[in-house]
Amino acid sequence: MNGVKPIPAELLTDGAVLLTPTGSGYLRDNLDSVRIVRVSAITDYTTGRTRDCTELVMYFDCVNSSPSGTEFAAGQSLEYCGETYEVVSAELFAGEDPHHWRVKARKTGGEHI
């Protein structure tokens, strides 16, 4: 793997569900041994009203995360802790071999609070 070690398994303690749109709904894949960093954000849309726009960054290691061979793209969604996040970007870090994916996702349907 190009001399670069996989992300240590001790850091890959999270799980999520990947939702890929199909003609009749969504294909659901359980993702195991991933790292998810949650970034809270509140956005002001109008005076006195705000919306929860929480974002996630998920790291999927090409050796230690599963299922092996999973690919990511904008337009997919992630379910994490009972909430749905739309994938806005997915970047594969690779040399000769794939190393890991960095997937950024934004909460969908954030309630006005």
Image (cartoon, grey):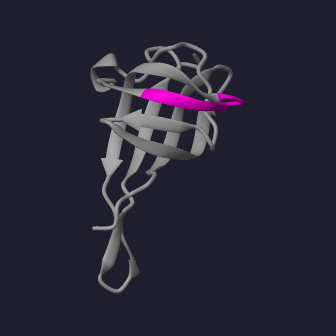
Of all residues shown, which one is farthest toward the bottom?
Answer: 47
> How far across and how far down the image is residue 2, in percent?
59, 19
Q: Nearer the viewer, residue 35 or 52?
A: 52
Name the dominant secondary structure of the magenta segment: strand
> How far across and how far down the image is residue 27, in percent?
59, 23
- Tell me if 22 is positioned left or right of 113 in this view: right
> How far across and how far down the image is residue 103, in percent?
51, 40
Where, by quadrant of the figure, is residue 46 drawn? bottom left
> How far across and how far down the image is residue 75, in percent?
63, 43
Span of residues in magenta = 17-24
> Which residue sits at x=72%, y=30%?
23
Residue 26 part of the magenta-drawn span: no
Q: Does residue 5 appear anywhere in the picture?
A: no
Point out the image quarter for the N terminus: top right
> Which residue sits at x=52%, y=38%?
77
Residue 18 part of the magenta-drawn span: yes
Q: Does residue 32 appear anywhere in the picture?
A: yes
Where, by quadrant of the figure, is residue 49 drawn? bottom left
Point out the image quarter for the C terminus: bottom left
